Amino acid sequence: MSAVPSGVVTPVACCQLALSVGDLDGNRAAAQQAIKGAAAAGAKVVVLPELANSGYVFRDTAEASELAEPFDGPTVTGWTEMARRHDLIVVGGICERDEGGRLHNSAVLVDADGVRALYRKAHLWDAEKTIFEPGAELPPVVDTAVGRIGVLVCYDLEFPEWVRTVALRGADLLCAPVNWPLFPRPEGERPAEVVRVQANAAVNRMFVAACDRTGVERGVSWTGGSVIADPDGHPAAGPLPTYEEGMVIAKCKLGDARDKRLSARNDVFADRRPDLYRSILQSVVRTDSRTS
Amino acid sequence: MSAVPSGVVTPVACCQLALSVGDLDGNRAAAQQAIKGAAAAGAKVVVLPELANSGYVFRDTAEASELAEPFDGPTVTGWTEMARRHDLIVVGGICERDEGGRLHNSAVLVDADGVRALYRKAHLWDAEKTIFEPGAELPPVVDTAVGRIGVLVCYDLEFPEWVRTVALRGADLLCAPVNWPLFPRPEGERPAEVVRVQANAAVNRMFVAACDRTGVERGVSWTGGSVIADPDGHPAAGPLPTYEEGMVIAKCKLGDARDKRLSARNDVFADRRPDLYRSILQSVVRTDSRTS
């Protein structure tokens, strides 16, 4: 287990990119350019959006399949080269084809040593269910040079139990490539997606970096709102505006996430009551939703 | 199970009171006055702060013990009379002494039929651990005339698993009496406590009403910020300012909480992956915190 002395500052960046479905070369170039910019700004961890190679709004499974690549394909190989060159960590989303030909909405964590972790999104959003195979493994928590980093993708963040599995296994920083479709919200309110990132950070006293895309793709707008939340639940950087490419970078003392105390007598992990949660969290529950 | 036709509007109120530790008569009068005001404004559910009979900052266990009363003591009896008179539901916190003489930080739900539920706070905050016995039962979800109402108290809200146990058992509205000590926060940021209420509402697609106190008690200030969040995670009313007595009231279509769908293919309950959560959520976890 890596020691992260308290006080060490790690710059963490989210690169909010305008991607374009189907434009593999353009998307790869945009990500490379963004990583270079983040490195120039001093970033040691760079988070990219979900499905950063392919874009998001596929016409159908066939189109997604054409754009998919293995986790060690050209996109991730490019990220690894950038990670080596600039001595940093990249977490980004890809449209992945596995050995058996199945498609996954995946994210990788790469550093100078190559691909350290592959994660397949376990909670699929809407039409993703018609295209991707959901993940069936716990999300990774990787011991890196800057601390322990967990990886989730987008809708995963709406399941606090899932976020907890990352936090309880010791993540100092959770990196989440996302593609948040834009929903209407009351004027003056932050996107609910950003609010949930903040809450996930606070209840687990860890850092959370969520990197969204921007632009309009086949009629779908994205929320933007890329944000890095601190263990108190406040934004350390961001959220970015909706229709803007750009980068947020925060100087994170990742070692702060090792201290789960809230008061002389409180610790957000030690205060949990798992024996009381057990019976309910596992049960099949009643819902009145008229699910289709 | 009560049917809540979609579209029916239920006014829900939180009464942010300035209480005073030790002043049982004054605190009871303040709560009664607040309930009366909420009824006049049309409220059908009235939420009061945590420890609304006693105040919060006890000198020691002896003082808390002197101020404690049975769950069917004068404070709650008074609330029940108000509930009958105005045909509404009251959820409020009390310093409770049980049959065995143990103290609990409790909340009750009362309606015209009397005490419908007693809940004892399961996650105790700081010095509460030296005074109160923690609850060992699941929180109540009560079938009322306006819908299903769950009850938690303050720090409980920081454990998303605990909130989930209420949501999964069908709560349309979660009522939480709270006493949020005021912490510093970045300028322009909402209190992290409010952010967590919003996220709890969103991930469970239910309403959450958190009622804080205000004022300064023995050097402790309170956050205020009483808020009613809707199933999208946005405030339906509030948050109130820190140093202000007052009421927030929101017209809640509680039936909306019966529909957990987010898209044609998504349902926040049906999309859960409890088999994947199981192994981790129950394990004793590693923490580097130097807990005292």
Image (cartoon, coloured by chain):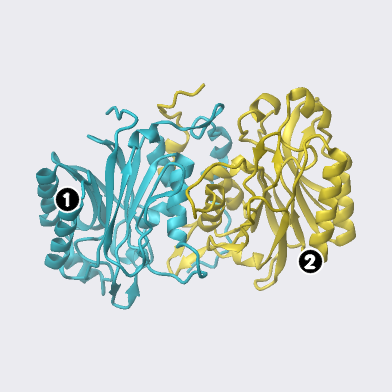
Chain colours: A cyan, B yellow
Chain of residue at mark 1: A
Label 2 sits on residue: B41
Q: Are marks 2 and 1 on the same chain?
A: no
Residue A106 appearing in the image: yes
Amino acid type, mark 2 = Ala
Percent position (x, y) of residue A261?
Answer: 49, 31
Label 1: which secondary element: helix
Q: Position of residue B288 (x, y in %)?
A: 40, 26
Task: From the viewer's perspective, tell me whether residue A221 is left or right of residue B186.
Answer: left
Check the image and name the residue furthest to the bottom: A219
Q: Where the N terminus of chain B falls, by quadrant?
A: bottom right
Measured Cα–Cα span from mark 2 to mark 1: 58 Å
Give above or below for B114 relative to B268: above
Q: What residue do we see at 33% from left, 32% from top?
A: A7
Left/right of residue A197 with respect to residue B178 in the rendered view: left
Task: Determine the chain carrying the residue at label 2.
Answer: B
The numbered mark at residue A40 is 1
